[in-house]
Amino acid sequence: MKLRAAVALLEREQLRPILFFCRSLGLLRSPPVSPPPVLSTFSAFASSPATYSTICSTEHEAVSITPKDSSDVLKLWGCSDDDIAELFKRQPSLRDARLARLNAKLNTLSSLGITGSDLVKVINCRPRFLGCRLNNHFDERISYFMSLFGSKEMLRKAIIRNPSFLTHDFHGRIKPAISLYEQLGLTREALIPMLLSRPTMISRTSFEPEKVEYICRTGVAPASKMYKYVVTLIGISRLGTIKEKVANLERFGLSEDEVLGLIGRSPLLLTLSVDKVQRNMTFILGTMKAPAKAVLEHPHLLFCNLETTMKPRMALAGKIRDMGLQPQIEAGMFTAIRMTEKRFLKAYVRCHPKDVADELMESYDHAKGLKRLAESSKKMLRKGFPF
């Protein structure tokens, strides 16, 4: 320690030549120099502060992006530019939507598996869907629908088909409506396809005593495959509309029981307008000279298009009769009307030589080209919800 103090004194007093001379003679030794500390790679790395970002570029961009409008919110959620354009076209008010609320609703839809393309279908069906509250009894509602539909994928399809499942009054409308169908004997397996095919089923369902009586008088058993169609179509139809359509067929000579039996065998008859049934029945009785009861055995006569199917094929049958060709259509007219276009032409036109077939085809095309009188000036009047 004394030696070090003496060396320090000589350096401080600027007597470096004397100090150098003493060291050269070996009188003074240089103090041992301690080696620099050896740091491990990890400790050296840990002791120095990071001078770069530890977040990858993608994460950094995602964190730093702040949506400025609803378009940015939809894009961050997963909608493409085409989807966003379609959404704004269908519902322009989305441009001014509150971003926090819009983002919360989109996150709710994400939990159900709804994607950007699915949202476009939903908005096309219900333009004001995103303006409704989606969190009313949400957990209870989803739990109920999961038990009804059986899987999340089936629930997703049901919501896309009928978004009102998330907006209708859960306790006041949805559960009571489904309970009515279950009381009438519809199982879950029968109810699911009806809910998917009839979006208005929940909102329009009602079962007055007269409706229940009509269901019983159709003669369809609950175990029949047609029962679910009969129940749902009568359930969503207005009672006055059912009576009007039944009375329309009664005017042509059918009894009420016969009409209800016909509805039991062909429930989609309730989806036809009164005007269409009147025109088809008038053609069947007046031109085809068939009895009114023919529709009881051949319900498809009421569904066929009068201008493009029944009239042209009836005209072709007369042409073939006048030319004395075989086979004749009139012998199997009801079957011929039910055929597809390709099968009909193969059976009655292309079976003849080319010159004859060309003549028949020309006559047939001319009959199909005839338009209904005053068709262009006809006003479309809708009563109730169009099926």
Image: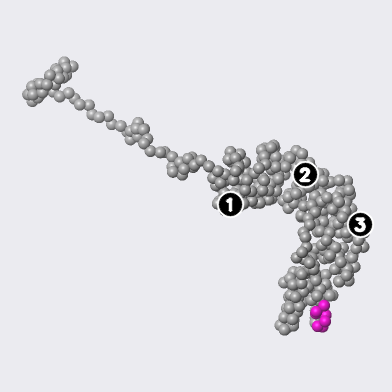
User: Was residue 320 drawn as part of the magenta stretch in this picture?
Assistant: yes
Residue at the image point whose x is 84% and y is 53% from the top: 241
Q: Amino acid at mark 1?
A: Ala
Q: Which residue is disc 2 drawn over? A: 178
Residue at the image point whose x is 60% and y is 49% from the top: 88
Separation of residues labelled 3 and 1 (CA atoms): 53 Å
Residue sitting at the far top: 2
First in sequence: mark 1 vs mark 2:
1
Q: Which residue is disc 3 drawn over? A: 256
Give the secondary structure at mark 1: helix
Give the secondary structure at mark 2: helix
Q: Is residue 325 visible?
A: yes
Q: Nearer the viewer, residue 326 or 116?
A: 116
Residue at the image point whose x is 77% and y is 70% from the top: 371
**Numbered tag placed on residue 177 in the rendering:** none
Q: Position of residue 132 (x, y in %)?
A: 67, 41
First in sequence: mark 2 vs mark 3:
2
Report the magenta residues as a range: 318-324
Main SS category, magenta section? helix
